């Protein structure tokens, strides 16, 4: 079954995401941490806010900024 064979596109996307996450961590460590905790850790905004020690509104702003920043970076690396 071909559905179990990873595609080259998936590998390239993961590499692009990893590289973009590294650049985000250099630019703003907390925003990168928010992405890691939410996307990879499955934490809620409230849980992240408590863990990081900032308000939920700050986490929401960080998440919104990081998503847009990562999308731009990934799109730019594909060009």
Image (tube, rainbow, N blue to C red):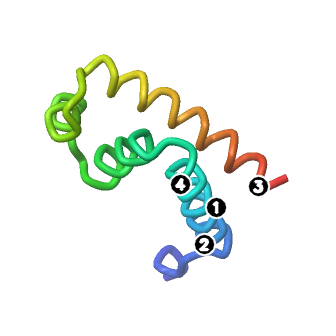
Chain-order first, disc 2 or disc 4 = 2
* Image marks 3 and 4: residues in contact by CB distance under 8 Å: no
- Name the residue tied to disc 1: 16
Q: Position of residue 2 (x, y in %)?
A: 54, 79
Cα–Cα span, label 3 and label 1:
7 Å
Q: Residue at x 66, y 68 (%)?
A: 12
Tell us which disc is closer to us: 4 or 1.
4
- 28 or 59, nearer to the observer: 28
Q: Residues within 10 Å of mark 3 (few under 14, many from 20)?
A: few
Q: Which mark is residue 21?
A: 4
Cα–Cα span, label 2 and label 1:
9 Å
Q: Position of residue 24 (x, y in %)?
A: 55, 48
Q: In screen coordinates, is 56 left or right of 70?
A: left
Instruction: Determine the secondary structure under disc 1.
Output: helix
Chain-order first, disc 3 or disc 4 = 4
- Name the residue tied to disc 2: 11
Q: Residue at x 17, y 29 (%)?
A: 46
Q: In screen coordinates, is 60 left or right of 26?
A: left
Cα–Cα span, label 4 and label 1:
9 Å
* Image marks 4 and 1: residues in contact by CB distance under 8 Å: no
Q: In screen coordinates, is 44 left or right of 66?
A: left
Instruction: Determine the secondary structure under disc 2.
Output: helix
Chain-order first, disc 2 or disc 1 = 2
């Amino acid at each position: 079954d071909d559905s179990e064979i990873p595609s080259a596109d998936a590998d390239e996307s993961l590499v692009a995401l990893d590289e973009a996450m590294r650049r985000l961590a250099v630019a703003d460590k907390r925003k990168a941490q928010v992405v890691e905790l939410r996307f990879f850790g499955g934490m809620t905004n409230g849980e992240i806010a408590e863990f990081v020690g900032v308000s939920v509104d700050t986490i929401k702003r960080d998440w919104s900024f990081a998503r847009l920043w990562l999308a731009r970076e990934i799109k730019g690396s594909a060009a």
